[in-house]
Image: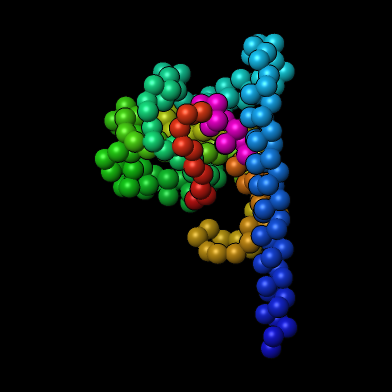
Amino acid sequence: MAKPKLLTLRQKLKRVTVLLIPFIVATTVLTLRFDTAADDGAPEPNNPRHSRAPAADDAALAHIPRSVVDTWSRREYLVVLGILSPDVEERRTRRNLQRTTCWRFPGVATRANDFTGAMLVLYVLGRHPSHGYDYSAALLEEAAQWQDVVALPMNEGRVSPTKKAGVGGPIGTEAEIGMSQKVYMWFDLALRLFFDREVHCEGR
């Protein structure tokens, strides 16, 4: 009876290891970037470290008006929360439910209050395979309406065909790698947009 339990434990440990390795690598890269930035006084236009960042930032913020981004930079948020979410109908419904319920509490910065509050909530998405690795028309409409969608220039990984929305279970290696990439790209972007704010990330 103990053998199946042991195998299950090993499988769980293997899964945790697969998820931890990209996180450790991403954290190390970010740390090194801060260390080199402290010693490198080259101005941005002549600094190769900044050559790709503006283009990536413009792509990620393509569906958010520049005036809104400027508003974010002026606000003194205590927390910026990035919620990782896929471009699928089930998660779109969840995002809209959150926007019309818990994000209505005082202190949450949304378009309705001109992004005034202690916590700014943004939804972080990639290009989903179900739409041919492009952003859906529904997402573009959602982004225009709420102005809180960060559309990263990256492709989502395919989720395991056995995984069902709202039901626990492994999402598959490809989707896990895509999620790790999304986490890294979100923090990389957030460190430039909100360098003096506390930034968090979670999956929904």
Is 115 on the left-hand or right-hand side of 18? left
Residue drawn where x is 45% and y is 32% of the image = 197
Residue 44 belongs to the span the image colors magenta:
no
Q: Position of residue 140 (x, y in %)?
A: 49, 32
Question: Outermost residue toward the left?
Answer: 106
Specify whether residue 135 is in view: no
* Residue at the far bottom in the pictured view: 1
For image coordinates 42% across by 38% down, the residue present is 79
Q: Nearer the viewer, residue 66 or 24?
A: 24
Left or right, 107 with respect to 178, comes to left
Q: Residue at x 66, y 29 (%)?
A: 35
Judging from the image, the colouring scheme is: rainbow
Q: Is residue 26 above or below residue 163?
A: above
Of residues 28 and 140, the one drawn nearer to the viewer in this rendering: 28
Residue 114 drawn at (x, y percent): 32, 27
State which quarter of the image contains the N terminus.
bottom right
For residue 185, above or below residue 36: below
* Residue range highlighted in magenta: 184-193
**x and y percentages locating residue 81 in the rendered image:** 45, 40
Q: Residue at x 31, y 47 (%)?
A: 101
Residue 76, by quadrant, is: top left
Task: Reply yes or no: does residue 187 show up in magenta.
Answer: yes
Reply above or below: 141 against 182: above
Can residue 90 be seen here? The reply is: yes
- Number of marks in the image? 0
Q: Main secondary structure of the magenta part?
A: helix
The one of 168 and 23 positioned closer to us in this rendering: 23
